[in-house]
Amino acid sequence: MGDIVLINITGRDRKGLDAKFTGILAQYSVTILDIGQAVIHEHISLGILAEIPCAQDFSLIFKDMLFEGHNMGLTVDIKPVDHDNYENWVHAQGKERRIITILGRTISARQISSVASVISANDLNIDSITRLTGRRSVRSTQESPKASIQFSVSGTPTDITDMRGEFMQISQTQGIDISFHVDNIYRKNKKLVVFDMDSTLIQAEVIVGLAKLAGVGKEVDDITEAAMRGELDFKESFRRRVALLKGLREEQIRGLAEKLPLTEGADLVARTLKGLGYKLGILSGGFTFVGEYLKDKLGFDYIYANELEIEDGKVTGEVSGEIVDGERKACLLREIAQRENLSIQQTIAVGDGANDLPMISIAGLGVAFNAKPVVREKAANAISTMGLDGLLYLIGIHEREISQSGSDQ
């Protein structure tokens, strides 16, 4: 067994740097045990963990590396590594790993410090930190800035429930979103994403718009409030609200879909995910006439919603078929996954309301989007500080990949 050394090279980055230093090591038949590199603002930090087969070569390697570093204006530090210490490090690689993602319009040192402190207090080690969003100008102002940083951490949390609670507190007081999920084989192998529609893909509740057209806005609001108080379940409240729409003309509701505003980032997230080969679906307690419009507009593969019954050009006040409530959404998610030959762990579900919790809770990645507090508390991941395209960063997609995949469509 040869000597093990840790080599750290820092300074201004330049072309050919890696080739030059690994070339020196190659002259002495060195084995690379680990290597990592990061470049921030044209300055490099290169780390190499190496095994030197012949102990007598250590001083020669040390001299050659220092000499080359001096010529290139770089700092080179070489330290021997104890074999027992190295073996302990190797055996620790089987530890649990998690991904923690911060989302916000901007990210401050205070926010990172708060998150890092919770990580440390729970006996986790930060193995790497990656910026997922693009570089930001300090001279020009972006209309809708985005910032996302991803931590890769190892170890078992001291108390995962308390840890999530602390992250929730930081989110609420410091205006950022914090996603926290296990890093496993499924994390980068998600293939199906389903979205709620009203207040998720679109910035509206369609039944409210229909109620206004029918002149029954207050009555519909009263039923909605009763449902929120727990006096009515979703199906019963839905039937009562739809009944009040009786008599609406078909041409009135058809024109409504095109006027509904898309949520910020909805078009980008759809184009990007489709470009990356994802299947997309809408699972909504709203109506199919809006869902079909969005399916065509955004290129979705599946749409399941409620069919508003129309006879002789007018709404009857009834719906056709089974009402899509929370439990139905969860069943549909399983059905689509099975149809696509996917594990439920390969799915992502995004929604804002309590009736989205069943599908959010069973998906491989469940996300509460601009959700009410009760939904945010029960969902492991949430987006509330940016648009729907924040989902792309939670998945771990870098901004340059977003631009590339979106432009391919």
Image (tube, rainbow, N blue to C red):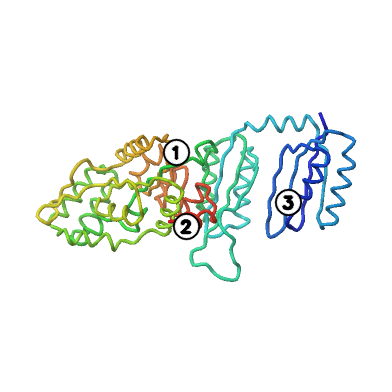
Q: Please name the amino acid that badge 2 sits on.
A: Met
**Label 3 SS:** strand
In the image: residue 243, left or right of residue 29 = left
Q: Amino acid at mark 3?
A: Ser
Marks 1 & 3, CB-CB < 8 Å contact: no
Marked residue nearer the N-terminal end (2 or 1): 1
Q: In the rendered structure, which amino acid carries the disc numbered 1?
A: Gln
Query: Pointer 3: what residue?
Result: 45
Q: Residue, x 50% and y 46% (percent of image)?
A: 395
Of mark 1 and mark 3, the one earlier in the sequence is 3
User: Residue at left 42%, top 54%?
Assistant: 271
Residue beneath the point at 62% across and 35% down = 155
Q: SS for tag 2?
A: loop
Residue 139 falls in image quadrant: bottom right
Q: Could you tell me residue 293's position as x and y percent?
A: 28, 56
Count residues near mark 1 (Cα–Cα under 10 Å), then give few for <14, some for 14-19, many for 20+. Answer: many
Q: Secondary structure at mark 1?
A: helix
Vertical order, 39 against 361 (above or below): below
Decide: few, some or many residues near mark 3? Use Cα within 10 Å; few <14, some 14-19, many ≥20: some
**Label 2 crowd (10 A; few <14 / some 14-19 / many >=20):** many
Residue placed under numbered mark 1 in the picture: 346
Q: Nearer the viewer, residue 131 or 273?
A: 273
Closest to the camera, between mark 2 and mark 3, is: 3
Residue 263 point in image, percent of width and height: 38, 58
Residue 157 against residue 282 in the figure, above or below: above
